[in-house]
């Protein structure tokens, strides 16, 4: 049995979405495959709802331009669920231009939708990849994030 929705989302991303983004298997056959892989039907339903929320936010417009650099203060709920390292990574990605304000908000929305008590930096990295992969025009940022994620040293530069 798998641990949580993020495990299922990562499994989907690695095995179905990343390799063939335009090939969309029907939900029933995909559900059957996921159950065979050991995921519960409740987790599968939650993952599909999470993906529907991601799809709703596809093609978000830019929020302001480069001259518009709002300061983001994490809510109490976000601060309690995102550890310090994860929040630092989000700010770093925004400061380096990998995430613009619209994608940052989308990322935070999808992180909070995971309904996990604590979200780590590694989990944030996976959700960033999923958010960027879902957004047209974010290919360079996706590639940069993928390099960061699979960097042997696991360190990002400040």
Image (cartoon, rainbow, N blue to C red):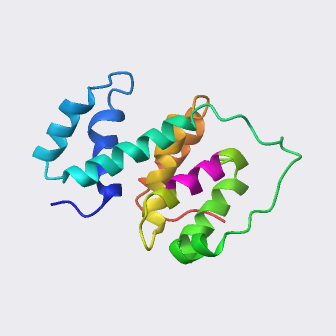
Query: Residue at 10% of width from left, 45% of height from top?
Result: 36
**Residue 117 covered by magenta stretch:** no
Tell me residue 50's x, y (percent). 42, 47
Residue 106 forms part of the magenta stretch: yes
Q: Residue furthest right?
A: 67
119 vs 124: above or below: below
On screen, residue 128 versus residue 64, left or right, reads left
Q: Quadrant of residue 77?
A: bottom right
Q: Position of residue 112 (x, y in %)?
A: 51, 61
- Relative to the observer, which residue lies in front, 139 or 9? 9
Most foreground residue, 64 or 46? 46
- In the image, 116: left or right of 70? left
Residue closest to the eye, 146 or 136? 136
How many labels were placed on the picture? 0
Residue that sits furthest to the left in the current view: 36
- Our reading of the magenta stretch's main secondary structure is helix
Q: Is residue 51 left or right of residue 61?
A: left
Residue 16 point in image, percent of width and height: 29, 34
Residue at 19% across / 52% down in the picture?
39
Q: At 25% from the left edge and 64% from the top edge, which residue is drawn? A: 3
The answer to which quarter of the image holds residue 158 is bottom right
From which residue to which does the magenta span run?
103-110
Q: Nearer the viewer, residue 154 or 15?
A: 15
**The quadrant where residue 118 appears:** bottom left
Instruction: Kindly tell me whether residue 10 is visible in this rendering.
Output: no
> Picture coordinates of residue 91 (x, y %)?
67, 62
Does the rendering let one see residue 60? yes
Using the image, determine if residue 62 lies above or below residue 105.
above
At horizontal 52% and vertical 48% (from top left) the residue drawn is: 145
Quarter of the image for the N terminus: give it: bottom left
């Amino acid at each position: 049995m798998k641990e949580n929705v993020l495990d299922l989302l990562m499994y989907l991303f690695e095995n179905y979405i990343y390799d063939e983004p335009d090939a969309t298997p029907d939900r029933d056959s995909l559900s059957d495959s996921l159950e065979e892989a050991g995921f519960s039907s409740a987790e599968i339903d939650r993952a599909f709802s999470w993906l529907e929320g991601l799809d709703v936010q596809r093609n978000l417009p830019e929020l302001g331009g480069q001259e518009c650099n709002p300061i983001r203060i994490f809510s109490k709920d976000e601060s309690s669920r995102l550890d310090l390292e994860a929040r630092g990574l989000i700010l770093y990605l925004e400061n380096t231009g990998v995430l613009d304000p619209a994608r940052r908000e989308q990322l935070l929305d999808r992180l909070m939708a995971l309904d996990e008590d604590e979200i780590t930096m590694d989990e944030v990295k996976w959700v960033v990849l999923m958010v960027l992969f879902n957004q047209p025009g974010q290919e360079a940022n996706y590639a940069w994030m993928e390099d960061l994620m699979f960097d042997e040293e696991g360190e990002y530069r400040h």
